Image (cartoon, rainbow, N blue to C red):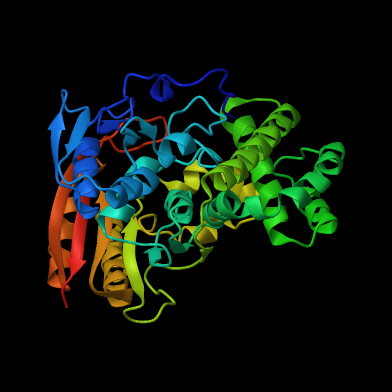
Amino acid sequence: MIERAESQFWAYEIDDKNTGKDLVLLDNVQFIYELSLAELELKAFGAEFEVTNGLREFKILNKSVELKEIIRSKGSYYKTFDGEFTDYYYIIQKNETRSVNQFLTHWIYPYKGKFHPQMIRALLNIIGLKEGDNVFEPFSGSGTTALEAQLLGINFIGIDVSPLCVIQGRVKTESIYVLDEILEIKDEVISKLVPNLFSPETNYYKMIKDLTSDERVRNFYKMARLLAVSDNSRRKRDFRTSFIKNLNLMVASVKDFIEIKERLNLNLGNVKTEIGDSRNVKLSDNSIDGIITSPPYSIALDYIKNDVHSFKDLGCDVSKMKNDFIGVRGIGKSRVELYNEDIKKSYSEMHRVLKPNKYAVIVIGNATYQGKEIKTVEFTIKYMENIGFKLVKNINKIIFGLYNVMKKENILIFRKEK
């Protein structure tokens, strides 16, 4: 699916020019919203600073050993502090792809609308989440928040109506615990591989079930197959060749994850990702320390149609799924109305489960449907404030990327007041 990187990215260039400087941004930081998030993150850490050198560096005014360690170990957009590389600098170099934002296991599966990992790491810090806290995502999607929370030692609870999303999130965060078991059956899986794409006689999933009783290992091999299914369907690539190539990349990425965990002595957070409905969350009132999510852009993007090849291969009833996915139901004006009603229920559930004075971050943009702009951002702000949230920050975000359906979004940070 994605080619292996043959050399270091320009974003990771190693040099000694940063020696003696306070805090230097990573070379790939290029958007205004990223600088805004970097500044908010520093404020959350308690830093006082000045932006210098053409917005590429920060002079820390209240420098201390403790503050330096916090920024070095938790920071998102920084390359060096006093000439010493940050933890995240080392983390993002563990990349088996050609895409800067697809390091570790982030790259697995070409899901549209992915978060930028650095943005999520910054937001986790900005809303004050610490090791052992619980962050909730009612639309867990491709698992970016799950993985970034895990790296920071924050516990993650995520739900999604899509079984494909749940598998993605689990594979990206659970495979490091079962690498030996994954490798034990690798050769046998390859030797028994038979494509039979979209055929009811496909025996691959039964074969995996017979080879291992560990669901984490099964999910790993399910995802390896789904990558090959995607490559075959979208790019007409040979199924077997794609499967073997991506399987090897997945194994290499998991090894990278294990290596960086050990090198940086990371205390990983617990991750729990399950099938669930954002309109009816199975969590207690006032039980969550923070929320970060991006509601589905189903009005602008049909998530079922986009991944129909994978859903069919998993044996899902695609026609039935349309009744469960927010934004897919209905046509014309009724589709927008149904979407709004579903989103209201989801936002109300977010308010219910979040602790008072804690923060909910919603990344969302105005979609275009049947030639008309749907004012989703304004709708979200108005409804969230009506149910007891206060908007404390609204950051404009310009989007570039292969799998992004939206070109502009807003990062809305709310605090629960009542």
Please indicate whether residue 8 sits to the left or right of residue 329 in the image.
right
State the image coordinates of residue 257 (x, y, percent, origin top left).
58, 43
Q: Quadrant of the N terminus?
A: top right
Q: Quadrant of residue 68?
A: top left
Q: Is residue 66 left or right of residue 162?
A: left
Q: How many marks?
A: 0
Tell me if I can see residue 249 in this picture: yes
**Residue placed at 30% from the left, 38% from the top?**
406
Where is residue 301 shown, x and y percent of the image? 37, 44
The C terminus, quarter of image: bottom left
Q: On screen, 156 above or below 30?
A: below
The residue that appears at 42% across and 35% down in the rendered structure is 89
For residue 409, say whether it is visible. no
What x and y, as percent, mark residue 110? 51, 37
Residue at x 22% of width, y 54% of height:
44
| Residue 328 quadrant | bottom left
Image coordinates for residue 58, horizontal then vertical, percent: 20, 34
